[in-house]
Structures are given as C-alpha cells and as structure tokens.
Image (spheres, rainbow, N blue to C red):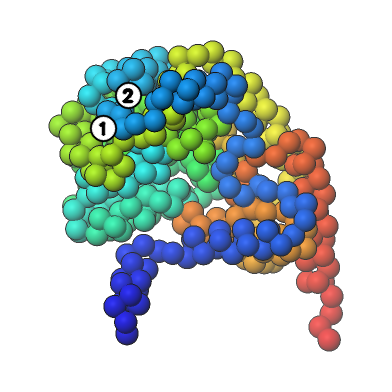
Amino acid sequence: MQASDLHANRLANRVKLKDAHIITKMTDIAAGLEDVIKLGRGDPDLDTPAHIVKAGQDALGRGETHYGHPLGLPALRTAIAENIKAYGGADYAIDEIVVTPGGQHAMFVIALALLNPGDEILVPCPGYNPYGQAAELADASVVNIRMSMETNFTLTADMVKAAITPKSKVLVLINPNNPTGTVTAPDEVEKIAKLAIEHDLIVISDEIYARLTYGNQRIQPVASLPGMRERTITLSGFSKAYAMTGWRIGYFAGPRELIVAMAEINHAFAISVASVSQHAALAALTGPQDCVEEMRLIYDERRKALCEGLDALGIPYAEPQGAFYVYANVAATGLPASEFCERLLTEGRVLMYPGTIYGDYTDDFVRMSLTQSVDRIREAMTRIETVVNTIRAERKAPAA
C-alpha cells in the first residue's frame, strides 16, 4: 500500500465519509437533471439583505482587505455581546467571544480544545453530523442520544441522564434542532442544565437557528441559566437568520479560561475571518432587524404549505417548531429513506436528504428544507405524490 493510500485510509477511519458521499452523489445526480426542486441543503434561497451587502461592498471600497484581530473585529464582538444579552443570553466581555469562518468551523475548534482521547461527547441523534466528525478528529468517543417521534425528536433530560457515563465530558444541545426542526422547551433545557452541573459536563449550546421559531416557541439560552455560564460554550452565526451562508462567518462565546485555548486553535486554523464578512456581519447586528422577521414569516408560510402537502399524502412528520426543516417519515412507502430520496430525485426531480446523514438509526426519515418558494414547494409535493403512487403501485403488483 502506498503512503498516500495509507493516509487516506486512516483519515476515513477517523472521519466517517459516508455522509459526505451521499450528499456528493445526490448533488451529482441533480446536476444532470433539469428543473430540480432543491429541498436538500440548509442554504436559504433568500438573498442577504441589501444593507448588509452594501456594508460589505463599502468595506472593500475602504480597503478592508487585510488580516484582522485574531478574535474578530472588536466592534463586531461588542455587537455580538450586546445581541446575545438582548435575547436573554449571558453577559460576555469581548475577549470571551471568538469570530470564526462559519459555525461549522467553530465546532471543530471547540472539539479540539475541549476533548481528549477517550472522552465522551453526548450528541442528540439525529443531529448535525459535523459534531461527531469533530469529536473523531479529537480521538474522542461520540455517544448518540437517540430521539424519536415520541418526544417530537426533542432532547429530554431523561435521555441525557441515561447516556451519561464517567467518561462523559461534553453535551451538545442544538436548539432549534437540525435536522428535525424541533425545539427543546425552556423547562426541559433547565432540567438538562441541572444535569450538566450535577455531572460536571460542559455544554455546547448551538443556537444558530434561535431567531427562527414558529408559534409560541421560545429558545432558552443555556449560558444564562444559574451555574451554567462557566460551563457553556454558546455557538451561533449569521448564515441562517441573515441568509449569509456564503459569507462564512460565525462565532462562539464562553468563559475566558476556556476561550483562551480555543482562540489559539482558531488563529492557527484561520488567522482571522475575512474582513469583508466581519463588516457585513456588523451591519447585520446593528442595522434594521425587520429583515429577519420578514424571512421568518416567509419560512413559516412555506412550513405550512409543506405540512399541508404531507398531510394530504398521509406522510407523518415531527412538528416543525423552528429552523427551516421538516423531518418526515417515509417508511410507509416501503423503501428505506436513502433509497426513497434517490428515486425521488431521479424520477421526480425533487432533492432532499435521508436522515441517515444526520445519524438517524432507522433510515425511515428525510429532511426537507424550506428553501424554495411556496409555489415550488407545492409543485414538489405534486411530484412527490406521483413518485409515492408509483412506489405503492409497484408494491401492490403481483410478482411475475
């Protein structure tokens, strides 16, 4: 075996590449088709608001094209601290905040700083898969906390308690959850926080979708709960609420004694975040916020349209309470979700992803993103109905 092959095998063993392979395969199939309705990636189809784009353009015009502060633009970190507090979070100094090139980058920095070989990180399952990949790079063990429709795919304190062992060190709470679009209620978050204190766990509170909730749902920031500031890393960013995925900018905040090491790792990886993105993010936080509400209402309208379509098809789903996803159970089609998604793409030209990408252990569920207009969502449901009827007819047909 050549050295390059050996290195690739080691990498594959440490980071599970199956998830990336599925996404790449589906993307490649879609590229060869016309008029695909894309309900796959968590990438808003809405444009970054104009005043944010202008701030980026103005920054370029001023020559803001050089390295910045390793922790992030001071004015931006000040705005982040004020924003966190304004929405019920903890009170942070600007040297307790690190700006990163996206929230996903932050996950790897946090994992490498907090986890040692043999440590356990507790991750909701299904949940955002890079948390597991980051833990594997740190030679830590991932403990998947299995959720189900019985609790609307939300994490509960009882689930967490059952998963804790003497090796448990870090707990991930994604709220609202990706991929399920569900919200852990404030009282349940409080119970989970008490468990974290009791078992000396550090909590990564992923709140990147916190501005996107529906109905009467409310997100309880973890770090502001009693005894939690010193053991919580709050992770968020600008990609979702401000439709800034391509700007690649996120952040994390936490107690100074933990942030110091994380900041050094982040500096080694990235030096600093692109200056143009930081000035755009500053405008996002300090400018008018009506754009966030406008986008939230658009997603809510799409959510209702998608759920109406699923109801008409008799396809059950978790109640979507936040983010911009619907997590639907396609087991009644008789196909594994992974196979269903591929057939839906090739025969119906609708792209969505199976829940297995996000750690789902059943291969029954698909994640559908609310990243198309209401008209396109309704067209997608018509195409889905056609494919589902075809599959059902095949199952009823007598064997040759």
Q: Is residue 254 above or below residue 121?
A: above
Q: Is residue 38 left or right of residue 225?
A: right
Q: Is residue 154 left or right of residue 134?
A: right
Q: Quadrant of the C terminus?
A: bottom right
Q: Amino acid at mark 2?
A: Leu
Asked whether 78 or 131 is in front, the reply is: 78
Residue under numbered circle 2: 73
Structural crowding at the residue carrying mark 2, measured as other residues with C-alpha within 10 Å and reported as few (<14), some (14–19) or many (≥20): many
Q: Quadrant of the N terminus?
A: bottom left
Q: Residue at x 64, y 37 (%)?
A: 45
Q: Which numbered disc covers residue 203? A: none
Asked whether 334 or 4 is in front, the reply is: 4
Q: Is residue 247 left or right of residue 275?
A: right
Expressed as whole percent of the image width and height from the top left, the position of residue 268 reads 24, 44
Residue 113, by quadrant, is top left
Q: Amino acid at mark 1?
A: Pro
Q: Residue furthest left?
A: 257
Expressed as whole percent of the image width and height from the top left, the position of residue 260 reads 17, 34
Circles 1 and 2 in contact, beta carbons < 8 Å: no
Q: Residue at x 68, y 48 (%)?
A: 38
Q: Which numbered disc covers residue 70? A: 1
Structural crowding at the residue carrying mark 1, measured as other residues with C-alpha within 10 Å and reported as few (<14), some (14–19) or many (≥20): some
- How far is mark 1 from mark 2, CA to CA? 8 Å
Q: Residue at x 52, y 24 (%)?
A: 57
Expressed as whole percent of the image width and height from the top left, the position of residue 293 reads 59, 20
Asked whether 162 or 106 is in front, the reply is: 106
Expressed as whole percent of the image width and height from the top left, the position of residue 190 reads 34, 29
Instruction: Check disc 2 and report its element: helix, strand or loop.
Output: loop
Instruction: Check disc 1 and report its element: helix, strand or loop.
Output: loop
Asked whether 321 or 256 is in front, the reply is: 256
